[in-house]
Image: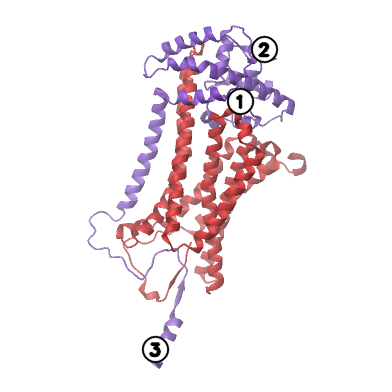
Amino acid sequence: MDYNISMNTSSVVQSDCPEVRVPVSVFTTIGLVSLAENFLVVVAVIRNSNLHSPMYCFICSLAAFNTVASLTKTFETLMIAFADSGTLEKTGSSETKLDDIIDSLLCMSFVGSISSFLAIAVDRYITIFHALRYHNIMTMQRTRAVLAIIWSTCGLSAILMVRFFDSTFIMIYFVIFFLLSLAIICFLYIFIFMLARIHARKIASLPSSGGRRWQWRGSSMRGALTLTILVGTFVVCWAPFFLHLIIIMVCPTNPYCECYRSLFQLHMLLLMSHALIDPAIYAFRSAELRQTFRRMLLCSNWRQCV
Amino acid sequence: MSDLHNRSQTSARRGDYVWQYEYYDDEEPVSFEGLKAHRYSIVIGFWVGLAVFVIFMFFVLTLLTKTGAPHQENSDSAEKRQQPGSCMVDFTVSQQRNEKAFSRPLLMGPHSYFHFYIKEEDQAEGTQRNTGATGVGKTHKDGGAQQGTCSQNGGTSYSGMDDIEEDVEAAGGHPSLKEIMDESKTDRECASLSPFNIPNYVNMEPNSTGADDTEDESSIVLERQSYPRDVCCDIH
C-alpha cells in the first residue's frame, strides 16, 4: 500500500520476524473473484426492478464498495508485481500520485463497507422494531439521501486520510470509527436477535404447537449461528488490519509489535477475503437475487431474460 | 566542497527506490535481543482473544434463547404506542385464529419487507412450504383452508434472523400491485392485533428457564378471554 524509498540497499534490516509475503497470484485470484461476484450483485440489483427497495439498495452499495476495493487492490498488486520485476518505471511523481489515488480509493471503500454494514443493520433494526412504520421511515428518497451521504463522506474522508496520513489524528479517527461501528452493529443485531427469540418462545409455547418446541430450538441455534457468522466474519476480517494501525501509532519500534506488523500482507488478504465472503452472507441470502443471477448468467438472450 | 558534491552525486546515483509494502522506516533496525516472551506473542494473543470473543458471543446468543430477555416490554409497548388503535376487529373466538395472531407478532407492513422475510407468494408454493415449514412462527399447519391470507403470506414475522437464514421468497411470480397492497393491509391488520395481546402477556413473563410452558399457557388463556378476536382472516 505504500512504497518506501531506501537510499542504500545494503542496509536492509534482517529481523527475526521477516515479512510474510503472500504470492501475487493469491491476491490477484481473490481480487478478481470478489470483483466478479460483487459486480454481478450490483448489476443484478440494478437490472431487476423488484430489488429496488431500501434493503437491496444498501446491499448494492456494499457490493459496489467491495467492487471498488477489489479492483483497486488487484490493480495495485499487479502494479507492484510489475514494479518488482522491473517492467514499470520507478520514477517519482507519477507513481506517487498513482499510489495516492490507489490509497484513497482503498480507504474510501473500507470506510464505505463499514458504513454499508451499519446501514444494513439499522435497516434491519427498523424493519423489525418499527415494522408498521417502516414504509414511512425508510422511503426510497431517504435511502438515496443516505447513500449519497455515505458515498460523499467516504470520498471526502479518503482524500483527507491520504493527504494527512502522517498525522496520527487520522488513524485515531479511523480506528474509533471502526470500533464505534462494530459496537453499534453488535448492539443492533443482538437486540434484533433477542426480540426474535422472545417471539419464537411465545409461539413455541402455544398449546397446539406441540412438536414445534424442538423446531424452535433448532431455529434458535440457526439464528445464533447466523448472527455469529455475520458479526464474526466482520470482526475477524477487519480487526487485524485495525490493530495494525493501532500498533503503528503506539509502538513502532517494539520488537513484538514489529512481528505483528510483519504479517501485514496476511491482514490485507483477510480484508480482501471479506469482500469475497460478503455477497454470500448478505446478498445471496435472498432468493430473488439468486434467481436474478441465474437468469443473468444462464440466459443467452439478455433482453428476454431480465 | 567538491568532495561533498561528489559524495552526494554518488549517493544519488546509487540510490535505489524500493517499492515495498512497508509503513515503517527501515533505517532504524529493531533490536531482537533479550526478548522475554515469544516473538509472535502479540499475534497469538490477538487471535486467541478474537476466537474467545466469537465463541463467547455464540454461547451468549444460545443462552439467550433459553432465558429470554427483559427488553420485551419496552419494545412491545413502543409498538403499542405506535398503533393508533386501528385494529379492525371481528369478535370471533377461534383458537387457531388466535394462534395465528401470535404467529404474526411483528409485522408485515410494506412489501419491501417481503424481501426480507419469508414470503409465499403463490398458493402452490405456499401450501408446499406450509407443509414443509420447519421454523416456529411459520404458517400454521393446523388451520388449513380457513387460515386465509395471513398464513398465506407466510412470513415468519418475528425473526429477522430466521428470515436471514431461510430463502427470501420474494422471487418467482412478481405479484401484482393490488395483491401486494391487499397483503400489506392484511398483514398490517394482523400485526395490529399483536401489541394488544402483549401487555397481558408481559405480566406473566417467565423469568426462569424452567416451567415456561405452564406460565405461557395461562397467559395465553388470559389473553384469549380478553381479546377473542380475529382480524385477518375474515377479510378474504
Which dot, 2 or 3, sits closer to the camera?
2
Mark 3 / mark 1, whichever is N-terminal: 3
Q: How crowded is mark 3: few (under 14 residues within 10 Å), some or many (20 or more)?
A: few
Q: Mark 2 points at which residue?
A: B234
Write down which chain is painted purple: B
In primary-sequence order, the first of circles 1 and 2 is 1
- Image quadrant of residue B176? top right
- Can you give x and y, in whole percent of width and height, for residue A179 in the image? 43, 46
Look at the numbered disc 1 and give the secondary structure of its residue: loop
Q: Distance between the residues labelled 1 and 2?
A: 18 Å
How many numbered marks have been drawn onto this rendered protein structure? 3
Q: Does any portion of residue A212 appear in the rendered image?
A: no
Is A170 left, or right, of A57 in this rendering?
A: left
Residue at the farthest bottom position:
B2
Q: Residue at x 33, y 49 (%)?
A: B44
Circle 1 residues within 10 Å: few <14, some 14–19, many ≥20: many
- Residue at image mark 1: B108
Badge number at residue B155: none
Quadrant of res B67: top left
Measured in 3D between alpha carbons, the distance from the residue under mark 3 to the one under mark 1, in whole angstroms, is: 81 Å
Q: Residue B4 carries which label?
A: 3
The amino acid type found where label 1 is placed reads Met
Q: Is mark 2 on a helix, strand or loop?
A: helix
Residue closer to the observer: A134 or A224: A134
Give the drawing colour for chain A.
red
